[in-house]
Amino acid sequence: MSKLWGGRFTKQTNELVEEFTASISFDKEFAEEDVEGSLAHVIMLGECGVLTEEEVTQIQSGLITVLNKIKNDTFEYSVADEDIHMNIERALIEEIGPVGGKLHTGRSRNDQIATDMHLYLERKTKHFISLIEQVQQSILEQAADNVDTILPGYTHLQRAQPISFAHHLMAYFWMLERDKSRFEDSLKRISISPLGAGALAGTTFSIDRSRTAEILGFMDVYPNSLDAVSDRDFILEFLSIASTFMMHVSRLSEELVIWSSQEFQYIELDDSFCTGSSIMPQKKNPDVPELLRAKTGRVNGNLFGLLTVLKSLPLAYNKDMQEDKEGMLDTVKTLDGTLKLLAPMIETMVVKKENMKKSVQHDYSNATDIADYLVNQGSTFREAHEVIGKIVLYGIENQKYLLDLTMEEYKQFSPLFEEDIYELLKPQSVMNARNSYGGTSEQQVRNQIEYGKTFIQT
């Protein structure tokens, strides 16, 4: 069968070229969006008098038949028809005859594919916003159960100060909230209609682009036809937000891997999110968080891939831009799988509170509070800092922790020490002393959890 654009050509397309340039293997993902855009376009053409009422009815009926085949997985895609637009147009013409060819009046494949991707990405972005909230909800639930659970807080992966485990978890809640906010804000730039911009310069037909935008639920219309068909900023922004989101997921995943190791034993992941070893029967491997860490790389790669494709393209459309789809689709698939795994994995993990508690009883993470204590007793902070450094060195050399030292030993370093130092150095006291806004005290963490609940819409 001849190409729909074949009038200009005297030779058939080389088979290798046909396979190499065809995009139907992946852009069939936009099949429903393509029909949706076409339905809006034909309604507008009828309202503007470009098509007759009868022609509009015929084309609508044919498109709905094609759409049903797509939804029922009975639609036959052909590489010979190159892309999703020509596959659907070919099927439409076969369904209703030559009148189907009038559907393409006043538009181009250039604005058509851009419309498809805008519709697709808008739907997926809203989906991801909803899934992020499910992960946030699982964090809130674990946090609520662990407000008084103490673990060592780290800087440089060295124990720093005792903190609430709920406080640590809530840090990821707010990272996800920023990711969600970025996705929400991006909808303003996704929900713009390029339909009717034509190949690059608009069309000679009297069409109403605002009407198709209204039918499709877009917030706005591209005011420049060149920009409409060549803009992929909305995909770059999606990939950028996705990369930031996956970076946050990777950080959380790294901690889950560390915490579930024999060296830490702070948590245990549910068996359904782990695998075993083919040779070492004792192993329980945290494969899911490990893979989530790794998949961050492919999402980053998709972002850099599209940046590279677009970096030196002249206006307007170029075939290079066919490369905008596979990376986006791969990222969509990766985010969907990631988010669907994260929520139940966090929800079902077992927190080993006693192991965390033991850790903060066998370190020097309460040292800073001694410095604060001495300052309140009249010392300068610099003097206090030096005193504590000597006390910690003494403890290390004598294999004693700060709560193990006698008052006589404390007095060797400063006469300002009194018996109340022991109550102050208890991990629970150290944690609850951080009662400033956003701090790790139980009261502040409870306040933070309640505040977090106000950001969950579902």
Image: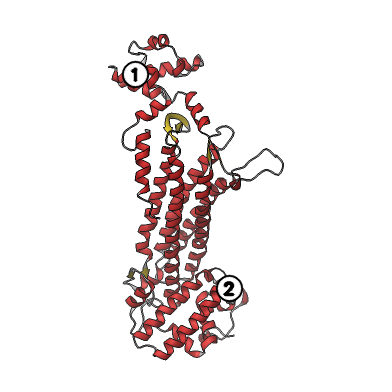
Towards the viewer: 191 or 16? 191
Q: Residues within 10 Å of mark 2 (few under 14, many from 20)?
A: few
* Residue beneath the point at 37% across and 21% down: 424
Residue 73: numbered disc: 2
Where does the C terminus fall, quadrant-wise?
bottom left
Q: Does residue 440 appear anywhere in the picture?
A: no
Q: CA distance from mark 2 to mark 1?
A: 74 Å
Find the residue positioned furthest to the right: 279
Towards the viewer: 88 or 438? 438
Residue 52: numbered disc: none
* Residue beneath the point at 41% across and 19% down: 389
Q: Does dot 2 land on a helix, a strand or a loop? A: loop
- According to the picture, the residue beneath numbered tag 1 turns out to be 384
> Horizontally, is 387 left or right of 90 in the view?
left
Find the residue positioned furthest to the front: 145
User: Viewer-nearest of labels 2 and 1?
Assistant: 2
Q: Does dot 1 land on a helix, a strand or a loop? A: helix
**Coordinates of residue 181 in the picture (x, y in percent):** 37, 54
The answer to whether mark 2 and mark 1 are in CB contact below 8 A is no
Q: Earlier in the sequence, mark 2 or mark 1?
A: 2
What colour scheme was applied to this rendering of the protein? secondary structure
**Coordinates of residue 352 in the picture (x, y in percent):** 53, 34
> Horizontally, is 189 left or right of 156 in the view?
left
